[in-house]
């Protein structure tokens, strides 16, 4: 009896003890509570943050119950701190209370903004640390070598977009000391001094991401001695070269990303041993050679779901028999040299979501699609012919369809697209297709964001556009649309349309500009008449405006000089405009192309052009401008093309006081004016850009994936040539039909990049150097 009572007493006492102990484990030590609260006070919280974990950190509450804080169950010491994605802003100094938590094993501060804080030596005191993640949190400077003291680290992620560096000695110490490391992610950190072979010293690694780390040199050709490696990312190291890495059958790699590097050579069929491979990205490299054996070897890769070989120099016919790729969901083979027909297996992969075969030399008909999960198809810029397969219009998940620049023929009725409720991008341009039924009264097409129907034999503004409330990009260029736009068309995309190309049609009037966020408007090569309406200046977001090759007349609205802060291209060439060019170009403008060639403009040039500090092209040719040589343009740092031909310029062209006037000028055409001077005294001998031309092209103005290519008209020996986005190794000087005199100077020979020189119809004497 006593034994039973004793046992019951002992049991109840034990429960009290256990209960008390359990309660005590919920209270973290006071000094750690204080340290965390001080840490919280160090930062402000971004008001846009969806959830700030530190909001739950309150005085007189147990820090072990706070969001993001993990405590040891026995000692109650803080061993884990996860403040990732908390919208924190502030600086972590070396005396931060963060370093008063020496028992931390896991620390995650990813995706905050620590205002260029350094990864200081204090981080090296966390000797118990197993997981450290400081990625994308605004750290900068050189990473302290003490980071290599964390010998218990299993996972280290210091990735960033830019601003961090790791010295060679620190990296070597890291590879020697962190022998337990399984995850090493240093994306964006400058490790340019590190030899690629040193990357192979961490045999325990399972995941390594050294993307965009400025690695250079040659990646080792020997077998990879990283038996546990599952993930290898080296993308964005443009100067890192090598052949496709050698693996052995013991490797069980899941993801390999070598994109945007200088890896080259042929792709080996031995890839078939990587039976666990799920993702392979070799895009934007220099791989070359025939592809059939490599593609055929993919048969064994039953887990492969992502394949990107785009932007290489691969060639050959894609094999017609490939099996067992039931997991493949994304195939990108664009921008290569593949030829032959597209094999049927590519259209019948059961898991396929994305298919991109664009920019190759593929030919023949397009087979019917049997992959119901397809969301994106890009077959553009090939040599495909025949009709658009009817099965495309049954792919109910399709969001992106790009078939432009082929030889596809037949009739496509707009009603066919009505079943594609998810379609947002459609491009059928530059085929021999005829779009039918586009003026049907039923406007129930998908809600498109991008619609590109250039060269589709369209004769009227399509009625189905009346339902397009989300349209952002519209291209109906090179069709047969005649006259004026219908009244309802002015309501299309008034709040959403940013890109509109109606060039190369037969439009006669265009008087309204109702689009609030329009950035790109191209109406060149129509039959537009009358003056440019001043309403055009209400488009305050416009960047590119092209009304060239029309019959416009009247004055140029003066507001065009400064009506949009982002305005960069104004092309009004080949019209009948008169008066002066805009008088005011505001300081700080972004204008880079002004083309008024082939009008009836008069008056002197106005000095406000000097405010166009980004100007690359100034074409005033074939007008009636009466002025002396605009020597004040010589200070424009980006000017590359200056065309003044066939005007009424006159007077002496003097030399310059600048060592290198017109520092980037490649094309100068002063012909058919009244200039005079001795050739030995004018600018030519100091034209730096003509002495050493590079392969740079004229800058493209990008609008999403659409761009405006500069083009200029150059007259050579009486013939007009249009150059589109010209290579600036092509340089021209034309001084013909003026009053220049004297000998041809010997320094002409130093202009090594000069391709065309015309001095005819002047008063030149002496010998030819």
Image: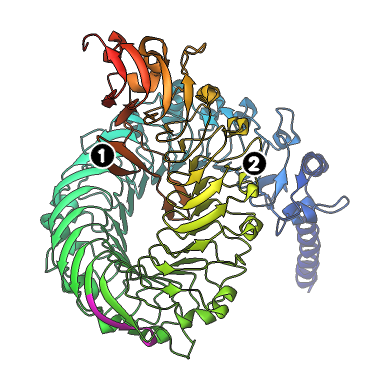
Calculate the distance from the C-alpha at mark 1 to the C-alpha at mark 2: 41 Å
Specify whether 417 is left or right of 604.
left
Asked whether 80 or 429 is in front, the reply is: 429
Which quarter of the rendered picture does the C terminus lie within?
top left
633 vs 357: above or below: above
Residue 470 shows which numbered tag? none
The spot of residue 575 in percent (x, y) is: 45, 53
114 vs 458: above or below: above
Q: What is the span of residues highlighted in magenta in the rendered image?
A: 409-415
Residue 413 inside the magenta-drawn segment:
yes
Residue at 70%, 27% (x, y): give it. Answer: 94
Q: How many marks?
A: 2
Residue 263 shows which numbered tag? 1
The spot of residue 190 in percent (x, y) is: 47, 30
Residue 441 inside the magenta-drawn segment:
no
Residue at 26%, 69% (x, y): give it. Answer: 431
Q: Does the residue at mark 1 contact the one at mark 2 (Cβ under 8 Å)?
A: no
Label 1 secondary element = strand
Name the image quarter holding residue 410.
Answer: bottom left
Q: Which residue is mark 2?
A: 104
Q: Closer to the N terminus: mark 1 or mark 2?
A: 2
Specify whether 96 is left or right of 567.
right
């Amino acid at each position: 009896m006593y034994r039973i009572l004793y046992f019951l007493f002992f049991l109840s006492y034990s429960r009290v003890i256990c209960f008390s102990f359990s309660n005590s484990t919920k209270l973290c030590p006071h000094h750690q509570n204080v340290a965390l609260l001080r840490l919280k006070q160090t930062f402000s919280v971004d008001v846009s943050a969806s959830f700030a974990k530190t909001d739950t950190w309150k005085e007189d509450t147990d820090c072990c119950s706070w969001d993001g804080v993990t405590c040891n169950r026995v000692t109650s010491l803080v061993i884990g701190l996860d403040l990732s994605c908390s919208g924190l802003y502030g600086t972590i100094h070396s005396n931060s209370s963060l370093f008063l938590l020496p028992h931390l094993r896991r620390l995650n501060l990813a995706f905050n903004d620590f205002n260029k804080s350094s990864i200081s030596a204090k981080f090296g005191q966390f000797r118990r640390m197993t997981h450290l993640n400081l990625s994308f949190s605004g750290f900068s400077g050189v990473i302290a070598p003490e980071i290599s003291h964390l010998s218990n680290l299993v996972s280290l992620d210091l990735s960033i977009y830019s601003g961090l560096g790791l010295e060679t000695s620190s990296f070597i110490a890291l590879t020697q000391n962190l022998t337990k490391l399984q995850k090493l992610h240093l994306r964006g950190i400058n490790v340019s001094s590190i030899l690629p072979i040193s990357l192979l010293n961490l045999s325990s690694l399972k995941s390594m991401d050294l993307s965009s780390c400025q690695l250079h040199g040659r990646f080792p050709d020997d077998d990879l001695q990283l038996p546990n490696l599952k993930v290898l990312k080296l993308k964005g190291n443009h100067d890192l070269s090598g052949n496709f890495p050698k693996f052995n059958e013991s490797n069980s790699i899941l993801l390999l990303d070598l994109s945007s590097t200088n890896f080259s050579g042929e792709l080996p069929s031995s890839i078939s041993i990587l039976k666990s491979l799920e993702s392979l990205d070799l895009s934007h490299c220099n791989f070359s050679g025939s592809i059939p054996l490599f593609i055929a070897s993919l048969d064994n890769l039953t887990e492969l779901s992502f394949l990107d070989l785009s932007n290489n120099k691969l060639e050959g016919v894609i094999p017609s028999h490939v099996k067992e790729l039931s997991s493949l969901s994304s195939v990108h083979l664009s921008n290569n040299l593949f030829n032959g027909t597209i094999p049927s297996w590519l259209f019948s992969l059961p898991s396929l979501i994305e298919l991109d075969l664009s920019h190759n030399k593929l030919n023949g008909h397009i087979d019917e699609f049997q992959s119901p999960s397809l969301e994106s198809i890009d077959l553009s810029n090939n040599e495909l012919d025949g009709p658009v397969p009817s099965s495309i219009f049954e792919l109910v998940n399709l969001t992106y369809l790009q078939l432009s620049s082929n030889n596809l023929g037949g009739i496509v009725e707009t009603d066919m697209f009505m079943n594609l409720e998810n379609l947002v991008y459609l491009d059928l341009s530059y085929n021999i297709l005829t779009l039918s039924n586009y003026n049907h009264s039923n406007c129930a097409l998908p809600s498109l964001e991008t619609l590109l129907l250039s060269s589709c034999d369209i004769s009227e503004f399509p009625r189905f556009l009346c339902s397009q409330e989300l349209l952002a990009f519209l291209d109906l260029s090179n069709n047969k649309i005649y006259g004026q736009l219908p009244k309802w068309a002015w309501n299309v995309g008034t709040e959403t349309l940013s890109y509109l190309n109606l060039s190369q049609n037969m439009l006669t009037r265009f008087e309204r500009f109702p689009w609030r966020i329009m950035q790109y408007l191209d109406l060149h090569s129509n039959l537009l008449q009358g003056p440019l309406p001043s309403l055009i200046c209400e488009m305050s977001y416009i960047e590119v405006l092209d009304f060239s090759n029309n019959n416009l007349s009247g004055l140029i609205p003066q507001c065009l000089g400064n009506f949009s802060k982002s305005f960069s291209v104004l092309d009004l060439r080949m019209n009948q405009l008169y008066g002066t060019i805009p008088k005011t170009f505001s300081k700080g403008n972004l204008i880079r192309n002004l083309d008024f060639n082939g009008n009836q403009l008069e008056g002197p040039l106005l000095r406000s052009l000097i405010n166009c500090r980004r100007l690359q092209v100034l074409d005033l040719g074939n007008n009636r401008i009466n002025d002396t040589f605009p020597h004040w343009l010589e200070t424009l740092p980006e000017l590359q093309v200056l065309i003044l031909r066939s005007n009424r310029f006159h007077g002496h062209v003097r030399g310059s006081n600048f060592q290198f006037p017109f520092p980037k000028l490649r094309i100068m055409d002063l012909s058919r004016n009244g200039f005079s001077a001795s050739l030995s005294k004018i600018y030519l001998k100091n034209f730096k850009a003509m002495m050493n031309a590079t392969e740079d092209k004229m800058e493209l103005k990008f609008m999403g994936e659409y761009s405006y290519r500069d083009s200029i008209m150059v007259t050579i020996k009486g013939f007009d040539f249009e150059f589109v986005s010209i290579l600036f190794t092509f340089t021209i000087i034309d001084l013909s039909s003026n009053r220049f005199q004297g000998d041809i100077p010997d320094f002409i020979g130093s202009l090594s990049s000069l391709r065309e020189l015309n001095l005819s119809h002047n008063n030149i004497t002496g010998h030819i150097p």
